[in-house]
Image: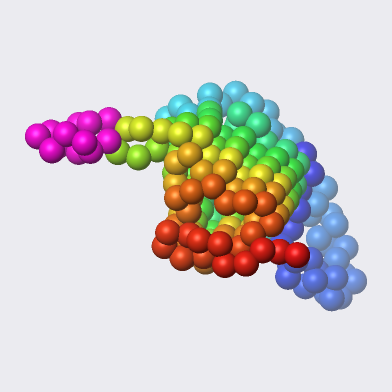
Amino acid sequence: MKFIERNEIIKFRESSPEIIRKIKWLESIFEKMFLAIFELVFSKVTTGSERWHIIQDRLSMKPSVGINSKKRALFYYKTLLKCGESLYVHPHVAIYFPQNVELGDNVYFNRGVFITARENVKIGSNVLIGPYTVINSGNHSYKDPSKLIRSQGHKAFPIIIENDVWVGAQSTILPGVTIGEGAIVAAGAVVTKNVEPYTLVAGVPARVVKRRS
């Protein structure tokens, strides 16, 4: 798997003294060895099992740099339904029903992204998901007022986020939504309907603000 690093960390390393860069180069050799071991361990984990969720929770608490970020990416790469190269996952990301999640190449999850995939959640390549975004393909049923909402089950519909999409911080993507290629979801938006390609949507519920020309 190809790994990526945060841009500010790359710039910091490039500006470091030569001796520091040499030490980091040596560390990278040992890092590759450890990651090879973790790859074998993750390959034996059943996606969606209790052990899977325990590993996810433990990894989510680790720092956002160095081998820990690579371990998180490798974990999802080896266990999700589909996961492309160059995934970057910040701390505190949580995925429920991971067996229904597909990711393309070069996907970036910022801190605190929360995905519940009762139905398939498919995210394309070169997608940026802002911090504390919620992507939820299921909702509680509530039509019968004589019953508790929690006892009425769920309805679920797939979510598709196509290539080159930017989802801003603290957005919410609801069931049945397709976000078209090149679209932008403004911070704090609640997306209840499909978003056309190369449009910018904002608000609650999200509406088209402008089209990218």
Task: Report the quarter where the N terminus lies.
Answer: top right
Image position of 95 (left or right of 72) = left
In magenta segment, residue 139: no
Viewer-closest of 18 and 165: 165
Q: Quadrant of residue 143?
A: top left
Left-right relation of 103 to 207: right
The answer to whether one can see residue 89 in this image is no
Residue 145 screen position, x and y as percent: 13, 38
Range drawn in magenta = 141-153
Colour logic: rainbow
Report the residue at 85% width, 70% height from top. Answer: 14
Judge whether 169 appears above or below 196 on screen. Answer: below
Relative side of 57 to 71, left or right: left
Number of labels in the image equals: 0
Location of residue 183 in the rendering, given as x and y in whole percent from the top left corner: 65, 56
The residue at 68%/28% (across/down) is 40
Taking the image as drawn, is residue 204 in sight? yes
Q: Quadrant of the C terminus?
A: bottom right
47 to the left or right of 204: right
**Point 84% across, 54% down: residue:** 26
| Residue closest to the eye, 83 or 199 | 199
Judging depth in this view, the residue of 8 and 71 nearest the camera is: 8
Q: Is residue 94 above or below residue 119?
A: below
Image position, residue 179 (x, y; %): 59, 48
Q: What residue is shown at x 27% (from left), y 30% (from top)?
A: 153
Is residue 150 on the magenta stretch? yes
Of residue 159 and residue 130, the one placed in the foreground of this image is: 159
Determine the residue located farthest toward the right in the rendered image. 18
Above or below residue 72? Residue 46 is above
Main SS, magenta residues: loop
Residue 75: give x, y in percent of width and height.
62, 38
